[in-house]
């Protein structure tokens, strides 16, 4: 009696055999799928995951590429903006069709042709404007098959250097304004002290011009009368860069020493002026008194000289009382003996 023996198979060995067969099976499926893609021309469009940044007025390059790589020369390439769909650039039948683009991109876009044979599509935007900021859709079509991807473009502009303007309020406080123009996107403005600490602004306004650029004005009211070393910074969130300007304000605070010295100086000047006035007044009075005394002395001398002349008895009119043979002369004379009242002697008989 013979026995047939069945080979004993370990469970672990059986699991390894099944895993090997499964790996070969899945590898074959992947290879078959790739071959199928190559045959029917299937592909996938990919692009950068992170946003691209372009400076205002410069150039922007938006890339997308095929996976697996294929020649794109005979494919249809369409670049559009977000909904509602606006054609930015169209490439079809081996040539560009700028007439299909919207007016705002007319003459400002082109495709980089020297990399298309590698399956790479690069859209170049010239003279970048604030309105170019946003998402773009790259669509590549071959026959009835197409694929697309989204790319985000961020436009940035640092704007002008901060400018200061100082005003004095009615209450005597200083109001400091900081302005910057031509920023994109909307910037963040900060006031900082000498220690680098942020100071809250009293007001902040943002406006946009017809081109979409931002103009920012922020003001700070200085309530403390002390030395201020301030910094106004305008920060661009896209570029992570900032422009800043430093400003120093020194407000003099009078101390007791300064006040005392000033008061002493003023009192000294006033005292000197008063002393000069008193001396001048005294001199004037002294001169006047001397002049008066001199005038009086002169008058007394004159009276003394004229008194004998004035003491002569008046001529009598009673001629009968005088002797007939007596003749006298009556005359008023000055100090030289000349007559003062008549040209010659008067003879009385």
Image (tube, rainbow, N blue to C red):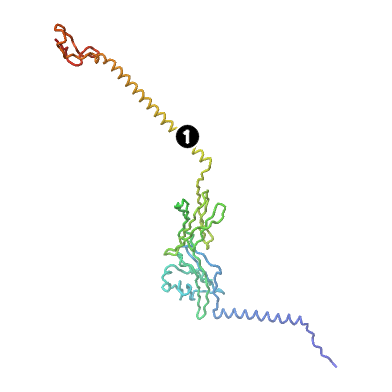
Direction bottom: furthest residue: 1
Position of residue 219 measured from the top left corner of the image (x, y, whole percent) = 48, 56
Above or below: residue 67 compared with residue 220: below
Q: Residue at x 53, y 62 (%)?
A: 237
- Which of the 4 image quadrants contains residue 7? bottom right
Residue located 79% across and 85% down the image: 8
Between 173 and 348, the residue placed more toward the observer is 348
The answer to whether one can see residue 57 in this image is no
- Splitting the image into 4 quarters, where does residue 297 fall? top left
Q: Quadrant of the N terminus?
A: bottom right
- Residue highlighted by disc 1: 268
Image vertical order of residue 255 relative to residue 58, above or below? above
Q: Given the current orientation, which residue lies at the most extreme top position?
A: 325
Question: Which residue of the protein is positioned furthest toward the front in this rendering?
Answer: 321
* Residue situated in front as seen by the camera: 136 or 107: 136
Q: Secondary structure at mark 1?
A: helix
Is residue 283 shown to the viewer in this render? yes
Q: Identify which residue, 61 or 117, lies in the foreground.
A: 61
**In this image, 255 relative to 343: left or right?**
right
Q: Nearer the viewer, residue 245 or 193?
A: 193
Question: Is 340 left, or right, of 266 in this rendering?
Answer: left
Image coords of residue 296 (percent x, y): 32, 21
Quadrant in which the C terminus is drawn: top left
Residue 104 position in % (x across, y down): 42, 69
User: Percent position (x, y) of residue 222?
Assistant: 50, 53
């Amino acid at each position: 009696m013979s026995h047939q023996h069945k080979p004993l198979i370990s469970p672990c060995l059986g699991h390894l055999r099944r895993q090997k067969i499964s790996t070969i099976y899945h590898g074959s499926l992947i290879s078959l799928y790739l071959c199928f893609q190559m045959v029917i021309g299937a592909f996938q469009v990919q692009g950068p995951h992170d946003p691209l940044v372009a400076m205002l007025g410069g150039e922007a390059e938006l890339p997308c590429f095929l996976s697996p790589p294929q020649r794109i020369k005979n494919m249809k390439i369409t670049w559009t903006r977000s909904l509602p769909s606006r054609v930015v650039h169209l490439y079809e039948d081996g040539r560009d069709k700028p007439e299909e683009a919207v007016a705002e991109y007319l003459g400002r876009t082109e495709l980089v042709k020297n990399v298309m044979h590698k399956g790479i599509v690069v859209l170049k935007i010239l003279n970048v404007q604030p309105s170019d900021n946003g998402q773009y859709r790259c669509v590549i079509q071959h026959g009835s098959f197409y694929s697309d991807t989204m790319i985000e473009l961020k436009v940035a502009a640092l704007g002008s250097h901060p400018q200061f303007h100082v005003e004095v309020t009615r209450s005597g406080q200083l109001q400091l304004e900081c302005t910057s123009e031509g920023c994109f996107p909307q910037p963040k403005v900060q006031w900082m002290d000498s220690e680098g600490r942020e100071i809250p602004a009293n007001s902040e306004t943002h406006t946009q011009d017809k081109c979409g650029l931002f103009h920012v004005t922020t003001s700070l009211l200085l309530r403390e009368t002390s030395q201020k070393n301030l910094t106004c910074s305008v920060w661009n969130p896209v570029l992570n860069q900032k422009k800043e300007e430093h400003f120093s304000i020194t407000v003099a605070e009078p101390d007791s020493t300064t006040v005392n010295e000033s008061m002493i100086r003023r009192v000294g000047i006033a005292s000197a002026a008063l002393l000069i006035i008193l001396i001048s007044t005294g001199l004037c009075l002294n001169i006047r008194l001397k002049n008066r005394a001199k005038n009086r002395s002169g008058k007394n001398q004159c009276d003394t000289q004229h008194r004998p002349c004035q003491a002569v008895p008046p001529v009598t009119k009673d001629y009968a009382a005088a002797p007939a043979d007596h003749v006298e002369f009556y005359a008023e004379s000055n100090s030289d003996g000349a007559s003062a009242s008549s040209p010659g002697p008067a003879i009385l008989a």
